[in-house]
Every structure is written in structure tokens, then in C-alpha cells.
């Protein structure tokens, strides 16, 4: 599935501008033959490898430029509402008829609506980043599940996500995507900071899920972040070395994928990862000091964490001048 995402993303970047025209057109079917070259082109640009040949089928790698690369809201096939409806409806139907345990039925419906919004506003890049988060998050939940069940700290419903989980994890990113779509529709040019905030929001939740699930199963020593005293695994606000490393890796993977599909620049990977780690620490502080005392749900804490990560990434983007 990840390979399919990579191929589709590379095909997406084969859109072109005809001679004498100003609008970018969708990629030709023949560009499917050039997908491997496009993947190599993007990788070699990072590694500093000089190109042997140049092709006019590929757009310039603007992610490495100082000027933001904006794709036309109307002309790009990847943000067309028809493709959004076709792809999301197909996946919704397959998952509804299958015996999947990733989402509950109501959670699947809400995820379908979220998918429509993300594809219409951010195109394949934003949609696939959120889809990758869902896949990796579900895998983390299933890792060491028997250990967590023995400790009595496994996720309810076998790890299946409901509507509250969907919007608690992706509510902030949905707001960023909606703002991006509205401002693009209105003709606002520089929108890269909203994409940065979108990715940071999802990366923070990816880091939280990975650190929590891996830490509960394989964390050898768990400490409460407020006073650094040893506590049992699964305690609100507790962290472990194993879980923290898994969280950093999860945030990096999601941020790197967002860079591959063109949502953020290479420098943006570090901004979104740092923002997600800051937000995760804030979430642990809230969990240790207020969650049990004030009976705050995990979904509310997650919403605060993802919103914090988006704000931090936005601020870092402004301060450091990180742009697409």
C-alpha cells in the first residue's frame, strides 16, 4: 500500500505546463512510464546527485526552492472533487463490506467524510498523509497486544477507532485543510504554513500513538513526567525511553512521507517533528496533572495536543522562514 502511495504521488508530480500557456495541466497517461525517474529525481536532488538528463514532463522541484509552489485549485486532477468522491467511496465500500477492525462502522463513516474534505482541499498529498497515519497508528495498536491485554491496558474495542477518535486525532488537521482550501479558492498565494501546521498536527498524534502503544507493551521503566517518579505502564502522563524513541520515529516517518508527496519542504520535516515532540510533552504534562483530576477524556487531550502542535509549527515556520 505504501508503494502504491509512492507511485501515485510521483505520477501526480508529472503535471506540466504546455508551451505558451500559464496553467498547469494534469499528467498524461504516458507519464506512468516515467514514475521511477521522478522518484529518482526527487531523491537525487536531496543527495546532491547531478542529473544525467532532463525531461520536460516533470515540474521543477519547488520543494527545494525559496518560492512556494502552488498548484491550481481548478486544474489539478488531484484536488478535483470527483476524484475525491470516487476514491473515498470505493475505499468506504470495500471496508464496509470487509471484516476490518481498524474503524467501527460509525468511525468509518466519519473517516469517509474526513477523507472527502482532505482530498478536496489538499489533494492526494494531504489525504495520503492522513491515510498513512491511520495505517501506522493501527499497526502500533496491534503490536504487543497480548502483553497489554495481560496488563489490562489494551485499547477498547480491539483498537477499532470510533468517531470520537477520528476527530480527536484529526480535527485540528481538518481545520488546517479547510482553511487551505478556502484560501486557495479565494486566490491567496502563500499557503505553505497551513500545510506545515496540517502535517505537524498529524505527526504529533502519530508520535503520541506510537509512544503510548510501544511504551505500554515494551517500556521497561515508566516515569511520571510531572515528578519523574516510577509509575505503572499505562498511567496518564507517564513516559518511557522505548516509547519516546518510537514516538520520534513515528513523527519522522509521517513527516518524511509528507515531504515525498509535496506537502512540506525538506526543512519542514524538522519543524513538524520538533513541533510534534513539544506538543507530546505538553500532552504528558496535562495527562499527569489534570486529566484524572478533572476527568478529561483522551479525545479532548488529543485535540489540545494536535492544535498545540499546529500552532508551534506555524510559529516556527514564520520565525525560521520555512517555506515550500
Image (spheres, rainbow, N blue to C red):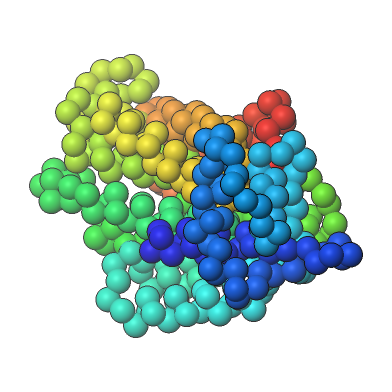
Of the 4 image quadrants, the one containing the N terminus is bottom left
Left or right: residue 262 versus residue 94 is right
Q: x, y percentage for residue 60?
A: 70, 50
Query: What is the quadrant of residue 216 in the picture?
Result: top left
Residue 256 visible at all? yes
Left or right: residue 86 versus residue 78 is left
Identify the residue shown where x is 44% and y is 75%.
91
Depicted 196 relative to depicted 93: above or below: above
Q: x, y percentage for residue 65?
A: 71, 39
Q: In the rendered picture of this protein, how many numbered marks are placed on residues? A: 0
Identify the residue shown where x is 18% and y is 36%.
218
Left or right: residue 109 versus residue 22 is left
Residue lying farthest to the front in this orientation: 52
Depicted 284 relative to depicted 71: above or below: above
Query: What is the quadrant of residue 81 in the picture?
Result: bottom right
Identify the residue shown where x is 60% and y is 33%.
267
Q: x, y percentage for residue 190?
A: 79, 45
Residue lying farthest to the left in this orientation: 150
Of the 4 image quadrants, the one containing the C terminus is top right
Identify the residue shown where x is 69% and y is 70%.
26
Residue 286 visible at all? no
Q: In this orientation, which residue lies closer to the viewer: 89 or 152?
A: 89
Q: x, y percentage for residue 90?
A: 47, 80
Amino acid at each position: 500500500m505504501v508503494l502504491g502511495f509512492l507511485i501515485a504521488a510521483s505520477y501526480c508530480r508529472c503535471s506540466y505546463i504546455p508551451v505558451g500557456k500559464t496553467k498547469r495541466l494534469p499528467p498524461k497517461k504516458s507519464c506512468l512510464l516515467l514514475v521511477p525517474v521522478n522518484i529518482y529525481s526527487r531523491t537525487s536532488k536531496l543527495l546532491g546527485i547531478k542529473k544525467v538528463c532532463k525531461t520536460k514532463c516533470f515540474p521543477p522541484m519547488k520543494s527545494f526552492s525559496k518560492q512556494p509552489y502552488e498548484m491550481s485549485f481548478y486544474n489539478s486532477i488531484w484536488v478535483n472533487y470527483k476524484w475525491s468522491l470516487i476514491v473515498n467511496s470505493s475505499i468506504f465500500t470495500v471496508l464496509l463490506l470487509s471484516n476490518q477492525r481498524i474503524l467501527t462502522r460509525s468511525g468509518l463513516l466519519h473517516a469517509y467524510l474526513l477523507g472527502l474534505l482532505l482530498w478536496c482541499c489538499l489533494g492526494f498529498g494531504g489525504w495520503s498523509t492522513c491515510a498513512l497515519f491511520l495505517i501506522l497508528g493501527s499497526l502500533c495498536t496491534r503490536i504487543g497486544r497480548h502483553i497489554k491485554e495481560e496488563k489490562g491496558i489494551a485499547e477498547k474495542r480491539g483498537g477499532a477507532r470510533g468517531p470520537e477518535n477520528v476527530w480527536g486525532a484529526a480535527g485540528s488537521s481538518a481545520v488546517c485543510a479547510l482553511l487551505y482550501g478556502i484560501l486557495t479558492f479565494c486566490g491567496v498565494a502563500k499557503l505553505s504554513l497551513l500545510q506545515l501546521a496540517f502535517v505537524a498536527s498529524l505527526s504529533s498524534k502519530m508520535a503520541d500513538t506510537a509512544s503510548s502503544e510501544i511504551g505500554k507493551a515494551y517500556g521497561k521503566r515508566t516515569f511520571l513526567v510531572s515528578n519523574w517518579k516510577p509509575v505503572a505502564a499505562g498511567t496518564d502522563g507517564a513516559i518511557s525511553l522505548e516509547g519516546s524513541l518510537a514516538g520520534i520515529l513515528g513523527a519522522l516517518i509521517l513527516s518524511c512521507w509528507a515531504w515525498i508527496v509535496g506537502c512540506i519542504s525538506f526543512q519542514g520535516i524538522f519543524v513538524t517533528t520538533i513541533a510534534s515532540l513539544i506538543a507530546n510533552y505538553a500532552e504528558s504534562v496535562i495527562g499527569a496533572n489534570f486529566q484524572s483530576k478533572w476527568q478529561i477524556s483522551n479525545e479532548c487531550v488529543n485535540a489540545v495536543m494536535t492544535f498545540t502542535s499546529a500552532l508551534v509549527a506555524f510559529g516556527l515556520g514564520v520565525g525560521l522562514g520555512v517555506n515550500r
